[in-house]
Amino acid sequence: MGSPVVQSQGDYLRALDVPSFLERPDVAAFVGPNLDTFKVKWLKDWERTKGAHKMMKFHWNPMAFVFWFTWFSYRKMWAEFASVTGVFCAAMFLEAWYEQHGGNIPDSAFSGMQIVLGFMATSLYFQRVARFFYFHPNPTQEQVAQAGGVSIPGAIAGTIAYLAAIFGTLYIADMIFPVEVIDTTLALNGGA
């Protein structure tokens, strides 16, 4: 059986009538909680851009800023979760290597990445929803339930996976790129 996809994803997004798309019952089931909040933001973006392919706009999402890893996994955005986790882990390795060679990357670099996620999460989620319906134009209820909606167990699993990845990365980076620790106890005790 051939794929139901008959046009490129870019063409699909250019032709997508977002107001009608957001009224579909299967889209509402896919998004689940807070659909109305998302609708307001996404419709505002669509009105400004007149194209779903241009809807990457900034919207502040405090939950995605503070707990992006939990929010992405709660919304079943597994590819995005894995990509961003990978970027954070790679950045931690780079930081460990750079510090071993005498440099210093300020922690604000990591805060900056979180701020970007806080602003972009809502738009990334729209792209996730649109991508699902691009590949599944007429999904079954089972497909929508499996790929969409929200998942508290997924949020817990994502949080545990993220913390394991970060602490594992820190441990491995410390093994590969050890930083010399200077003993300051002699200086504090007057050299005795």
Image (cartoon, grey):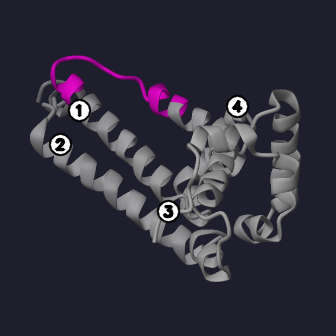
**Can residue 33 be seen in this snapshot?**
yes
Q: Residue placed at 60% from the left, 34% from the top?
A: 115
Between the C-alphas of marks 4 and 1, the distance is 37 Å
Secondary structure of residue under mark 4: helix
Looking at the image, which residue sits at the far bottom?
142
Secondary structure of residue under mark 3: loop
Q: Residue placed at 83% from the left, 37% from the top?
A: 46
Disc on res. 54: 4
Disc on res. 96: 1
Between the C-alphas of marks 2 and 1, the distance is 7 Å
Choose the circle earlier in sequence order: 3 or 1. 3
35 part of magenta stretch? no
Amino acid type, callout 4: Lys
Choose the circle earlier in sequence order: 4 or 2. 4
Instruction: Where is residue 20? Give x, y as percent.
Output: 87, 54
Amino acid type, callout 2: Asp
In contact (CB < 8 Å): disc 2 and disc 1: yes
Q: Which residue is mark 2?
A: 174
Q: For the magenta stretch, what is the residue range?
A: 96-112
**In the foreground, 99 or 191:** 99
Quarter of the image holding residue 135? Answer: bottom right
Within 10 angstroms of label 2, few (less than 14), some, or many (20 or more) residues? some
Amino acid type, callout 1: Ala
In contact (CB < 8 Å): disc 3 and disc 2: no
Between the C-alphas of marks 4 and 2, the distance is 42 Å
Q: Residue placed at 56% from the left, 64% from the top?
A: 76
Within 10 angstroms of label 1, few (less than 14), some, or many (20 or more) residues? many
Instruction: Where is residue 174? Give x, y as percent.
Output: 17, 42
